[in-house]
Every structure is written in C-alpha cells, then in structure tokens.
Amino acid sequence: MNFKSTKLAFFSPTGTSSAIASAVAKGIGIKKIEIFDATRPEIRKKPLKTAADELLVVAVPVYAGRLPGVLDDWLELIKAEKSPAVCITLYGNRDFDDALLELKEKIKENGALPVACAAFIGEHSFSTAEFPVAVNRPDESDLAKAAEFGNQIKEKLESFDPSSCSDISVPGNTPYKERPPKAPLDFIAVNDDCIKCGVCADICPVEAISKENPSETDINKCIRCCACIKECPENVRSIKEGPILDISKRLNTNLKERKEPVFFF
Ligand SMILES: Cc1cc2nc3c(=O)[nH]c(=O)nc-3n(C[C@H](O)[C@H](O)[C@H](O)COP(=O)(O)O)c2cc1C
C-alpha cells in the first residue's frame, strides 16, 4: 500500500523522543513528513487527524512508568481513520513499565491501527554532570537502531491490509501504575549569572517560567521535565539538593547497566 505522508507527532522537552521519532520516520522513507511538536502548548490544543493513506508516528517520554499526564487532553484530540500507527516511548534507562501499552491502547481507541511499537532509551531528564544517567542517549547506536526499526516498518507497510491487521503484544499491565500525586516542588536553582535571555521561558512546555524574571518558576505548573536546566545557554539552572537530586543520585548508582531498544511487531 502507498502512503501519501507520515504525520510525526511527539512531545519531547529534552529532545530525545523527537530525535528517535525523526530517525524512525527517515528509516520508513515516506517522502512527505508533517511534524506536530506537542511540546508546544498551542499544538496540544489542536486536533490531529490522519486518513487511511497516512502513517501516524507518535513518540513520547515515560514519566513514572506512564504517559506524561500533561498529554491526557492532547491524546484525546488525535483521531485516525484506520491509519497505520507507530507507537514509541522513550525512557531514561530505568523502565518503561506501562507507558508503551498505554500509548498503544490510546492510539487504538482513537481509530488507528498500530503496526509497530518500540521503547528506546534517552538521557534521563534528571541526569546531571555529577550524577549522569543514560547520558547522551540516544547515541549513534540507538539512532542506527531507530533507522533499522523504520526499515522494518517500511517492509511491513508494503503488504499492510487494514482489514487483517492483528493486535501487537507489548509489555505492561492493566490497571496501569498509579500516577504519583501531583505535589508542587521547588527544585530548580538559578544562580546570579542568569542574563534573563528568556530561552527557558520560551521552551518550557507548560509555560511555567516568567520571561521577565526567569528565576521564578510556577511550581504548580512545572512538570519537572528539566528542559529549562538542560537547554539554558548560560548553564545557570540546576537541580537543588532535595528529592529530585536524591533520585538522580539513586538512578546514577542503580542504573549503570546499559539497556537497549526493543521493538514489537
Ligand atoms: C517526571 C519524570 C518521570 C520520569 N520517569 C521515568 C521512568 O519511570 N522511567 C524511566 O526510565 N525514565 C523516566 N524519566 C526519564 C525520561 O523518560 C527520559 O529522560 C526521556 O528520554 C525524556 O524524553 P524527552 O527527551 O523527549 O523529554 C522520567 C522523567 C521525568 C521528567
């Protein structure tokens, strides 16, 4: 079957989900790629429709073994008319738990037909210079695997028949893991070298940072994605001593073993 375009949708505060999504789409090789970057709040408000002759690729990070709660409303806005779909989760070398299953089921509910699913590894959002976790992933090997995954999808799509598309089995349990209660946490330190350039405020996916005074983060909006820390051009933002840094230390100690991407067809 011939597909006229790939609709590539991702949420990716620190850029690992978007990097893998792009590499997979390249591997699939459909020339026209339309990007829906749901990291931007305005994109998360718009419906995303796909037709039967369009491929949907969705890539999102794992937060506490689940899909990030901030995506709940946006995922409802994806409507697919029996489009084949690729579901991808990115996790920080701990586990993806129920997130891939949750994504696949949600995409199915929305009318798409999942043809391939994968879990890739990205540098952990809480990784720091002192306590690195899956640092610099996806690396070259991960990107090569993403391209290979894309090639395998391309082959599967050549004989794709929507009327005989069987379900894909992926790890995960129902009911899904409980999301941790949303407890506001003041965990970002901003040092005096901040030049108030506003990059952090611009990239924050939930508009939690004041543009005039970037040292003010609205802890009720913050989803702890750490994009503002990782993307600060002056390197003035960091994780304060406290519960998040304790997680970084713990992950750094416990997750030395490299995990590898897994694919499901
Ligand atoms: C609040 C939060 C919770 C997370 N929970 C998990 C988790 O349960 N398992 C895991 O391996 N990584 C976890 N991570 C790490 C991210 O899944 C990982 O860094 C991912 O690559 C980030 O994607 P992005 O670069 O597209 O933002 C978590 C990150 C955040 C911010």
Image: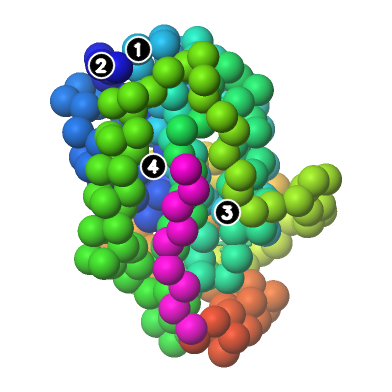
Tag 2: residue type? Answer: Asn
Disc 3 beta carbon < 8 A from ligand 1? Answer: yes
Q: Residue visible at 35% across and 17% down? A: 54
Q: Give residue 53's mark.
A: 1
Left or right of residue 98, residue 141 in this image: left
- Segment tinted magenta in the rendering: 257-265
Q: Residue visible at 51% across and 14% down? A: 163
As drawn, 165 above or below 133: above
Task: Pick whichever of labels 3 and 1 is earlier in the sequence.
Answer: 1
Tag 4: residue type? Answer: Asp
Q: Are marks 2 and 3 in contact (CB under 8 Å)?
A: no
Q: Residues within 10 Å of mark 1 (few under 14, many from 20)?
A: some
Q: Secondary structure at mark 3?
A: loop
Task: State whether the magenta stretch is mostly helix, strand or loop.
Answer: loop
Q: In the rendered image, which quarter is residue 249 located in?
A: bottom right
Disc 4 beta carbon < 8 A from ligand 1? Answer: no
Tag 3: residue type? Answer: Val
Considering depth in this image, is 56 or 163 the residue closer to the camera? 163
Q: Residue visible at 51% across and 66% down? A: 92
Tag 1: residue type? Answer: Asp
Left or right of residue 156, residue 83 in this image: right
Task: Pick whichever of labels 2 and 1 is earlier in the sequence.
Answer: 2
Q: CA distance from mark 4 to mark 1?
A: 35 Å
Task: Pick whichever of labels 4 and 2 is earlier in the sequence.
Answer: 2
Q: Is residue 167 visible?
A: yes
Task: Pick whichever of labels 3 and 4 is earlier in the sequence.
Answer: 3
Return the residue at label 4: 202
Task: Pick whichever of labels 4 and 1 is earlier in the sequence.
Answer: 1
Q: Position of residue 49 (x, y in %)?
A: 46, 13
